[in-house]
Image: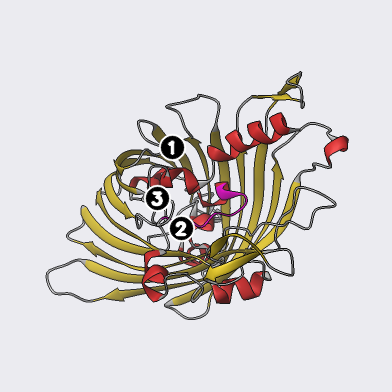
Amino acid sequence: MQQIKFRLGLILAGCLWINYAIGQNEQQANVITTAVPFLMIAPDARGGGMGDIGVSTTPDAYSLYWNPAKYAFIEKDFGAGIGYVPWLRGLVNDIGLASISGYKRFGDKQAIALSLRFFSMGEVMFTNDVGQELGAVKPNEWAVDATYARKFTRTLSGAVAFRFIYSNLVPVNYTKYDVRPGMSGAADVALYYHKELEIKGLSATYINFGFNLSNIGAKISYSSSSTLRDFLPTNLRIGPSFTMDIDEYNRLSFAVDLNKMLVPTPPIYYPDSIGPDGKQVIEKGRDPDVSVVKGMIQSFYDAPYGFKEELEEINVVVSAEYWYNKLFAIRAGYFWESKYKGDRQFFTLGAGLRYNVFGLDFSYLIPIRNNNPLQNTLQFTLLFNFEPIKPKDKEGKQ
């Protein structure tokens, strides 16, 4: 059993973002961790090429991940996207996130979308307590999403999304140890504001603002008898973007995203102390063993070091995107995270191509501090966007 736990820990080490805190002082670092962290991996190369951003950028097939309310403002009638994200490619070559997403617009005010994300953790050899090999397995996790988006006014839209999550970290029948796949459901609530401005000297300008509260759902467990249940990565993402058409060929956009995990911050415990309830005694902070709703509310004031630490839990992303004639794009972004919350800091570069109904996006990540699972790898996304089929007139013309 110890061998199983050890190898399972190795799998999770490649996924959980606590890896980014390696090398920091343990007394200072206070990284928030959750179950199924693959839900926070950007599945598309466009958002990945701009520093992991997308709550208020222009809508596309992968808006379900960033902000599903954007679908109500999408220009095309229907479309789809296929993507793959290599993970820890510097160590192994069989871990990655594959995804597919599609949408359909109905009239000018509403749209629906579906997506599937599949995270494979590669091949792992499991052993028993005495080191005997039990066979090679391939742990995996996946999520199926669905959303409905609708315009409330000419400038504001909203959406709700629903998600089924399946996490099979030990895909072997270990009835002796009461291990089972984890399952849960979650929901997103999103808003998107889009308004055209008039600025002298520019063909057109737009200001957008996005809000997405994602992964609101029941805790997940990997045992039928254990009372230990882990939070989903509930996340608040907000931010503005500004787009200007310099002329009929050149478009330039800037965007900012702010992200905060809405799960309890780990408290600081007194060393070697157990209270009457059998739990460790908290020195600073608050008890993280609370309900999902209370945990979301508590996440705004439960940091052991007070308001300063709460601000450190906000990740900041800035980006720029340039389009030429709606055919070719170049992108760049910067992601910042506090050194006490994981210390992820990196630049990203990206490019995009569009031709008729086809599109192709690429992204590349350059780490600034600490290693990153996506460093030295090329992420790509293939897109398809279709216009509505126009009915033919009496002469057979469309």
Viewer-nearest of discs 2 and 1: 2
Between discs 2 and 3, the one toward the N terminus: 2
Quadrant containing the N terminus is top right
Can residue 392 be seen in the rendering of this structure?
Answer: yes
Dot 3 amino acid type: Gly
Q: Quadrant of residue 121?
A: top right
- What is the span of residues highlighted in magenta in the rendered image? 29-37
Tell me the residue that label 3 is attached to: 47
Viewer-nearest of discs 3 and 1: 1
Residue 184 vs residue 228, the one in the foreground: 228
Left or right of 212, for residue 145: right
Tell me the residue that label 2 is attached to: 30
Q: Determine the secondary structure under disc 2.
A: loop
The Cα–Cα distance between marks 2 and 3, rounded to whole angstroms, is 27 Å
Asked if the residues shown at circle 3 and circle 1 are in contact, with their CB atoms under 8 angstroms apart, the answer is no
Tell me the residue that label 1 is attached to: 373
Q: Determine the secondary structure under disc 3.
A: helix
Can residue 120 be seen in the rendering of this structure?
Answer: no
Dot 1 amino acid type: Pro
Dot 1 crowding, Cα within 10 Å, few <14, some 14–19, many 20+: some
Residue farthest toward the left in the current orientation of the protein: 201
Q: Is residue 308 above or below residue 25?
A: below
Residue 286, image x and y in percent?
A: 57, 72
Residue 104, image x and y in percent?
A: 58, 56
Dot 3 crowding, Cα within 10 Å, few <14, some 14–19, many 20+: many
Between discs 3 and 1, the one toward the N terminus: 3
Q: Determine the secondary structure under disc 1.
A: loop
**Dominant secondary structure, magenta:** loop
Residue farthest toward the bottom in the current orientation of the protein: 153
Dot 2 amino acid type: Asn
Between discs 2 and 1, the one toward the N terminus: 2
